[in-house]
Image: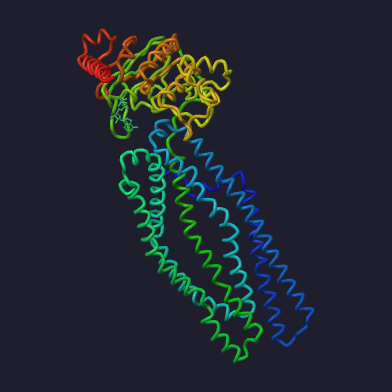
């Protein structure tokens, strides 16, 4: 199979496209800065040579000192400008990556988003992307300076005395050998470190999310095995990486900069032989001291390169996730009839719907019942295009959903599930999400229909009460009714209620059922319910069992013809009786 994965550099260039001028200018300033960075060395060495030659002319010494100072200040200014520019470019790159990721989330199947732990996306979009900022912002100015300054120094060194210049590099090959030792299997080792840190991040987010359960069951953090294991793996991977990397690195930074060991005796010999003058010799000593250290600093970017590479690949994996391929132009639907024809569907490798065929007619209420795990919610998700059928056809209004733009499906279908998310906004704004241009009066009407107007008006800030996020003090049932109000306001021709009344108390359930029946006039309603009493009036009830359709009919028909339905109904009735007795 052809590998279409882009490499890290291509990806970065793509993200950096809007700021390429900024990046290029950062490089230019960095190069100029490095060029001026060598000036103080040359000026100081000229002063030394002059003094050693017995020339104490203060004017020329002051001039050289001025040149040295100017070179230093210019280098400082140029590298600061380069750093500012590279930071601005890095922030633009980060913004573009984050935009691309969030845009991608809206294009991949909704089921993929729902199935991925929210911690993973949060970690990716916020933390993982953020990790790129430092290396991206600092690599250009610092790496350029750390490579260019020694190279320019070496050129001047050769100009002063080529023999000592070569001798000053004697320890460099040993340093390189150490570096090669460090780099052996480096990518895999560092990938383990990054993977462990990422797993720990995701487990921490999940652990904090589940802290209620941990506390309720009096579990300490150590007993939350997954979290504890990821923390341990994080520690182990870092220790292992350090154990394998550090000896080479330490040897490298100990040996490589010790060029003076060779320069000093050789230079002394040349001086005794009178093949070098004192000034040049002293200058060579100073230059050899500053030659290798910046290169060692540059090597420190090895980790950054590996980190950037792994991070960009990880981001790339998400960006390469297969998108739902849907047309853009809206299509004309003939009514709202929903039809499944021989639909099979698998989550990864496990087939959970086997050859499902049914029709849910316009203006009708079609209910799905069946034991837990029989596939009811999966059917609802296929209608809403959260996932796509593996085989067979799902159609709305006579058109295969694969040929309907996703935005049209979203407009057409209102999906209310048991855990509807409320945003950290006022109740009014949360309901308004169903219809962004709705007037306050319409919002109140929808809330009245969903039986939440009364409790909202009792809140101190009424419709302006902020709900959602961590500040919500609403009960599960109250949140549910707000979500239903949102769907009522949306007024879509197809409404899917996936266990939508699960949290509602019996009293409110009656009210909501009444408002739902008003809402669904002239609409196609799909209801997935455990409480069978809520769907007895359905036009059609489809009984599901182990991913297949066992029977379909009205409540009365199924009571007579379907054993499974009868069992479900009896179980429901006896549960109600038990509740009444215990009440
Ligand atoms: N996202 C998923 N990934 C993998 N398997 C899944 C996923 N969602 C559901 N399943 C599996 O698919 C099967 C059908 O699940 P589904 O939620 O559709 O059943 P259900 O009848 O709605 O169950 P319940 O009444 O308990 O909500 C089950 O075996 C379930 O474990």
From what the image shows, is residue 435 above or below residue 324?
above
Q: Nearer the viewer, residue 468 or 459?
A: 459
Rendering quadrant holding ligand 1 = top left
Q: Is residue 428 visible to us here?
A: no
Q: Residue at x 36, y 13 (%)?
A: 360
Q: Residue at x 29, y 9 (%)?
A: 554
Q: How many marks?
A: 0
In screen coordinates, is 573 left or right of 430? Answer: left
Place residue 536 in its image quadrant.
Answer: top left
Q: Residue furthest left?
A: 563
From what the image shows, is residue 383 above or below residue 255?
above
Q: Is residue 294 visible to us here?
A: yes
Q: Residue furthest right?
A: 59
Q: Residue at x 31, y 44 (%)?
A: 219
Q: Nearer the viewer, residue 161 or 572?
A: 572
Q: Position of residue 61 (x, y in %)?
A: 75, 79
Q: Position of residue 245 (x, y in %)?
A: 40, 64
Q: Nearer the viewer, residue 533 or 20?
A: 533
Q: Position of residue 286 (x, y in %)?
A: 61, 78
Q: Quadrant of the C terminus?
A: top left
Q: Residue at x 51, y 25 (%)?
A: 430
Place residue 364 in its image quadrant.
Answer: top left
Place residue 464 in its image quadrant.
Answer: top right
Q: How is the image coloured?
A: rainbow
Q: Position of residue 282 (x, y in %)?
A: 63, 82
Q: Quadrant of the N terminus?
A: top left
From what the image shows, is residue 5 above or below residue 411?
below
């Amino acid at each position: 199979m052809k590998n279409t994965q882009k490499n890290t550099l291509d990806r970065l260039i793509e993200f950096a496209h809007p700021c390429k001028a900024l990046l290029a200018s950062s490089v230019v300033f960095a190069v100029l800065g490095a060029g001026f960075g060598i000036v103080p060395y040359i000026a100081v060495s000229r002063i030394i040579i002059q003094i050693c030659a017995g020339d104490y002319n203060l004017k020329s010494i002051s001039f050289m000192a001025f040149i040295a100072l100017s070179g230093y200040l210019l280098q400082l200014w140029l590298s600061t400008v380069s750093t500012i520019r590279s930071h601005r470019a890095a922030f633009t790159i980060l913004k573009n990556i984050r935009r691309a990721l969030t845009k991608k989330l809206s294009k991949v199947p909704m089921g993929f988003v729902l199935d991925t732990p929210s911690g993973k996306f949060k970690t990716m979009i916020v933390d993982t992307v953020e990790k790129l900022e430092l290396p991206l912002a600092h690599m250009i100015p610092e790496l350029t300076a750390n490579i260019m300054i020694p190279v320019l120094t070496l050129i001047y060194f050769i100009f002063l005395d080529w023999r000592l210049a070569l001798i000053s590099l004697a320890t460099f090959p040993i340093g390189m050998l150490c570096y090669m030792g460090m780099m052996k299997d480096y990518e895999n080792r560092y990938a383990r470190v990054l993977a462990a840190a990422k797993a720990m991040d995701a487990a921490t987010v999940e652990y904090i999310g589940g802290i209620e359960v941990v506390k309720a069951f009096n579990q300490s953090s150590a007993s939350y095995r997954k979290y504890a294991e990821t923390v341990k793996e994080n520690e182990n991977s870092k220790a292992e990486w350090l154990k394998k990397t550090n000896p080479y690195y330490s040897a490298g930074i100990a040996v490589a900069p010790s060029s003076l060991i060779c320069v000093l005796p050789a230079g002394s010999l040349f001086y005794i032989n009178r093949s070098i003058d004192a000034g040049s010799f002293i200058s060579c000593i100073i230059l050899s001291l500053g030659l290798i250290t910046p290169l060692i600093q540059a090597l420190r970017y090895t980790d950054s390169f590996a980190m950037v590479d792994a991070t960009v690949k990880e981001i790339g994996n998400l960006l390469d996730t297969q998108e739902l391929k849907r047309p853009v132009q809206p299509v004309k639907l003939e009514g709202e009839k929903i039809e499944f024809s021989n639909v099979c569907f698998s989550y990864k490798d496990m087939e959970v719907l086997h050859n499902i065929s049914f029709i849910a007619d316009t203006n009708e209420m079609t209910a799905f019942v069946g034991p837990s795990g029989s596939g009811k919610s999966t059917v609802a998700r296929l209608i809403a295009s959260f996932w796509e059928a593996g085989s067979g056809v799902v159609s709305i209004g006579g058109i295969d959903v694969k040929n309907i733009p996703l935005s049209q499906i979203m407009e057409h279908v209102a999906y209310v599930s048991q855990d509807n998310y409320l945003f950290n906004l006022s109740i009014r704004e949360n309901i308004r999400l169903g219809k962004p241009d709705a007037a306050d009066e319409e919002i109140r009407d929808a809330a009245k229909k969903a039986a939440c107007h009364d409790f909202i008006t009792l809140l101190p800030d009424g419709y302006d009460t902020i709900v959602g996020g961590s500040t919500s003090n609403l009960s599960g049932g109250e949140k549910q009714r707000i979500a239903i109000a949102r769907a009522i306001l949306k007024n879509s021709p197809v409404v899917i209620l996936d266990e939508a009344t699960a949290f509602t108390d019996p009293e409110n359930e009656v009210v909501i059922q009444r408002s739902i029946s008003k809402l669904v006039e002239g609409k196609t309603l799909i209801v997935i319910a455990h409480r069978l009493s809520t769907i007895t009036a359905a036009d059609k009830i489809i009984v599901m069992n182990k991913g297949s359709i066992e029977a379909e009919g009205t409540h009365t028909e199924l009571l007579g013809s379907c054993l499974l339905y009868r069992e479900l109904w009896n179980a429901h009735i006896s549960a109600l009786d038990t509740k009444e007795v215990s009440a």
